[in-house]
Image (cartoon, rainbow, N blue to C red):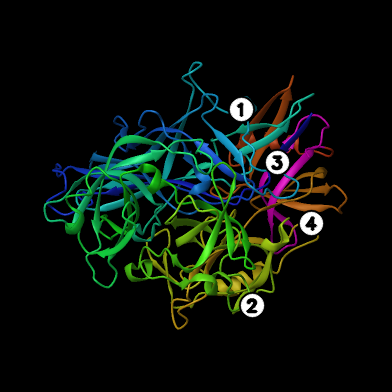
Amino acid sequence: MNIKPLRILAGTATFALLFAMGCGGGSSSSSQSQPASTGNVHVIASDDATEDWATIGVKVLSVSLVPQSGGSPVVVYTAPSPVPVINLLQLDQLGEIIGNATTVPVGTYTAAKLTLSANPGDVMLVTSADPEPGFDLGASYTVPAANIRIQGTTGTSGSLTVPLSLNLLQPLVVTANSTNALDLEFDLKHPAFIVEHYPASASAPLWAINFKGPVRHHLVKDLTRLLLRHTLGQVTAISTDDTTMTITKDFATYPVPAPGGTEAPIASNISLNILADSESANPTIFYDLDAGTKTPITSFSSVATTLPGKYVRVAARYQAGGTLVAVRIWASTSFQKVWVGPEGHVVHVNTATDVMSVNDENGNPIPISIGSNTQFYFRTPQTALADATPIGTGASFFDGTTPGGLPNLARGFKVHVSVIDPLAVPMVADTVDIEIARYDGAITAANPTNFDYTRTFTTALDGYSGTLPYIASTAANGTDASGNAITGFDWWYFTLPALADTSLNTVNGPVQDFVAATSYGNSVLKVWGVSYSNWGDGATNPSNWYARFAVLEPTQLPKGVVNTPWASINNGGSIVITPKAESSVTVDLSTVSGSATVVYEVTNNSGIVTVTQHDLTNPTDLATVEGALVAGTPVKVFGVPVASGAVGAYVVFYYDGNVLPQ
């Protein structure tokens, strides 16, 4: 039997429960009457990307908050029927509003509970149009439900669930007329989230889905910087003062239809109030897809009589008070027309033909032609004018490069495209919302001004190599975990420790520390990172991409065995392993709470694979691991290079028997 953990996935999926206390999301004429002792809860989901998958679909049945007082949990989200699939791959650092609870009692909450549906078929896996070399499945392949094994289920056949309970890193205090946020992350980077293995005599791999461990709490401090995925819904009312549109949230069905097919909505009872942008400098752009018109509006007065009952797709942003404001609205009597705009990660960029391909949820590359009038937007929710202003038009932007030679639009960017004629072949983009400008790859040549990325793909046309400068040291860059404003570039190890290296908590400065950190690599572990970029440096340069932050990611060492067993070191232990065809490497495991190495024991009992997590901060688990990591034990290590020349382990798998993981 072959057992192997999936390569590190480049992503983080988030369920962010946003508490808009005392705000209904609209004007006083449209807000619901609400007791002073309760608040609203917007339930939001978001995530990050991976090259190998087009869909990692999950079904969330409910979310609740646990009061500090020990009372009954307060339910803040209950799924509609049928339960919609949430595709974590479509939410690359974006949020999607999936719920809106309006009567959450004020008080202090210290934990959250999630219930996930876990029947066969409730987790969906579809490969991308162009997986990375070495991936065991072909392109655009839907993994059969029988080959997906969900871990930790409870209940009976047909009603299986996975219950999760998470302690909050910081108590969440709900008060009337205030705005708070609760962020629960599904970590797609976690090596134990999706584990691939081959039982004896199997013709195809099985995939073990493990939600325990990859789900965690993360603090969110600035609501206005949360980038929202386009919201689908049906208009139920326009406020009497024409400032606010009320919609009932709709979800798309999965699997989505093939290109040219018809999508049907899943209606919910989730009601959202969305304002028109009243500022004349950056009005809401209203697209009537039935009439083929495009009109700037500062209120809904011109469409107040015709809009109720229509389907809409809305690009919205949060204001500081928790209200939702529309940046752009697409409306039609047909759900198909508002849904059909291609959304996904860019999988191919061909500047010779001015065509990009966008990966849809079925793993299909959808070709999109860039016309002379195609407008490109970079979503910037915290700045209304920037969010509504195109950053470029046509081939001149599509074919352009950054000051360091990186492409203006690259494979891995997350986009949502709007088209006028969905039947055209190829479709011609009217607008392209760049929701995430993401570069990743091997990091080299870091200096105080910039650093280099080199990324290669099977399709050589998609590869890139060039220099990415940092945003200006004076540029606003969100807040830290304590709510303090950050300026300039920041970075962190995805693994250790949890805090970013920012202008607020650094000795040498975040850029100097980043340069020092990226200088440590070795023959078996390269420095690999991912950066999310801003359009402009936030100071004197108004255009081109600049790195807002970088995350140095754990990478996978070649498979190997323990050479020198566990030896205690300060705050942990050290082993020496011999990766296949490589010299020995020292691996340091941390026992420090909050940044401890995660260790998984993988066992095979008559073809049934079990993945058991060991907590190195627990003395019993620590003793088990110390006794297991002896000479000859097969291991798989994910880690980052550290200054001593060792590998700082993020996750370690060890296996029973003498079978090496592939």
Q: How many marks?
A: 4
The type of residue carrying mark 4 is: Val
The residue to which callout 2 is attached is: 447
In this orientation, does residue 389 appear?
Answer: yes
Q: Badge 2 local density, few (<14 within 10 Å), some, or many (20+)? A: some
- Mark sitting earlier along the chain (1/2): 1
Between the C-alphas of marks 1 and 2, the distance is 46 Å
Q: Amino acid at mark 1?
A: Arg
Residue 333, percent from left and from top: 30, 44
Q: Which residue is mark 1?
A: 149
**Whether residue 558 is situated above or below residue 146 in the rendered picture:** below
Distance in Å between CA atoms under marks 4 and 3 = 27 Å
Do tag 4 and tag 1 residues touch (Cβ < 8 Å)? Answer: no
The mark nearer the N terminus, 2 or 3, is 3
Judging by the rendered image, the residue that carries numbered circle 4 is 524
Name the kind of residue labelled 3 in the image: Gly
Q: Secondary structure at mark 4?
A: loop
Residue 432, visible in the rendered structure = no
Residue bearing the label numbered 3: 138
In the rendered structure, which segment of residues is drawn in magenta? 633-662
Q: Position of residue 23 (x, y in %)?
A: 21, 51
Location of the C terminus (image quadrant)? top right
- Mark 4 or mark 1, whichever is nearer to me: 1
